[in-house]
Image (spheres, helix red, strand yellow):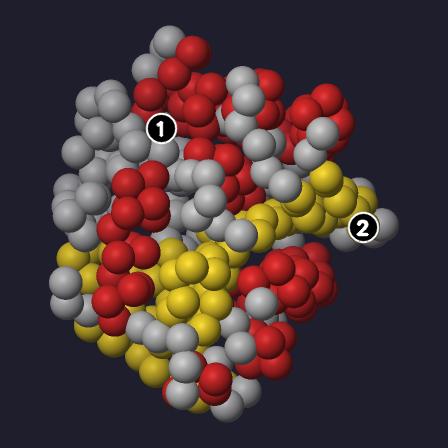
């Protein structure tokens, strides 16, 4: 595999890179950002994946989330992939809406036309991008954590549940925990995976837990004035599923916070610290 460094900037003693590479999984070029803390100059470091939400690219978290100081303090690599394949040949929402298609891959491998050719974000993140990171950067692949926001919170939880042992720590901001039960998720899963809802269950956190998938522990932050709280996020469903399954869930409802990166940036250092404690 070959990578092209689009930009490199020094920050907090480390290096913030934006990288492009040709993806076999999506058959497109893909872009991701990676922060290498100063400790990475002399040793392999643990790594935190961050999966972004609807409409986002790598740039939203890279520019707004204020993670670099905490990552430099704890010696943590931070990787932010894109949310979908992109390009003129990649299909998009036929109605031109923002909640589906490019920018909204939902971290699944699509099985339905015309999406199946390019929308293979599960394979890209479970196999292809980790192999590239391991080959090109000083990452300790035995110490990986994963987090994400909204659609990316959904992706972080389902990947951690679906790839047992790959991630030693898991957290999320405002995750879509039951996509099978909410409009954003039902639209995406129906288009990408087809109308048989039994195939959706392996990409639905609550359903996966009901079906026996397990995590040791989980940290979730959510704003109590998030405008999507009741219709799209439904954290009470995750609470019930974790309680019934005996999963240790720390769910913090943060008063006065919404769905934005003002919220995420406020608590990002807490999450980096939480992952660092578990990846030592």
Q: Quadrant of the C terminus?
A: bottom right
Which residue has dot 2 on it? 254
Above or below 27: residue 179: above
Name the residue at 32% across, 56% down. Answer: 130
Q: CA distance from mark 2 to mark 1?
A: 35 Å
Above or below 97: residue 87: below
Name the residue at 36% across, 33% down. Answer: 108
Mark 1, residues whose alpha carbon is within 10 Å: few (<14), some, or many (≥20)? few
Q: How many marks?
A: 2
Whether residue 155 sits left or right of residue 4 in the image: it is: right
Measured as percent of width and height from the top left, residue 81 is found at 38, 56
Which image quadrant for residue 74?
A: bottom right
Which image quadrant for residue 190?
A: top left
Please name whichever residue, 93 or 136, is drawn nearer the observer in this view of the structure: 136
Q: Quadrant of the N terminus?
A: bottom left
Which residue has dot 1 on it? 95
Name the residue at 21% across, 38% down. Answer: 118
Q: Nearer the viewer, mark 2 or mark 1?
A: 2
């Amino acid at each position: 595999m070959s990578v092209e460094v689009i930009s490199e900037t020094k920050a907090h003693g480390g290096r913030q890179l934006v990288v492009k590479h040709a993806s076999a999984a999506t058959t497109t070029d893909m872009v991701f950002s990676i922060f290498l803390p100063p400790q990475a100059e002399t040793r392999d470091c643990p790594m935190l994946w961050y999966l972004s939400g609807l409409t986002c690219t790598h740039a939203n978290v890279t520019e707004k989330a204020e993670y670099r100081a905490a990552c430099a303090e704890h010696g943590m690599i931070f990787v932010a992939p894109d949310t979908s394949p992109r390009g003129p040949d990649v299909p998009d929402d036929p109605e031109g809406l923002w909640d589906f298609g490019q920018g909204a891959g939902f971290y699944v491998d699509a099985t339905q036309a015309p999406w199946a050719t390019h929308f293979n974000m599960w394979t890209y993140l479970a196999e292809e991008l980790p192999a590239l990171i391991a080959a090109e950067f000083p990452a300790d692949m035995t110490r990986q954590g994963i987090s994400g926001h909204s659609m990316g919170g959904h992706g972080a939880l389902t990947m951690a549940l679906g790839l047992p042992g790959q991630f030693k720590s898991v957290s999320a901001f405002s995750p879509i925990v039951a996509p099978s039960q909410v409009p954003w998720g039902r639209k995406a899963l129906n288009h990408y995976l087809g109308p048989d809802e039994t195939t959706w269950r392996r990409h639905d956190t609550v359903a996966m837990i009901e079906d026996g998938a397990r995590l040791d522990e989980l940290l979730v932050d959510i704003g109590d004035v998030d405008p999507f709280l009741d219709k799209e996020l439904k954290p009470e469903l995750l609470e019930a599923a974790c309680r019934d399954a005996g999963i240790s869930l720390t769910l913090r409802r943060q008063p006065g916070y919404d769905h934005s990166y003002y919220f995420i940036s406020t608590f990002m250092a807490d999450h980096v610290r939480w992952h660092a404690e578990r990846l030592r």
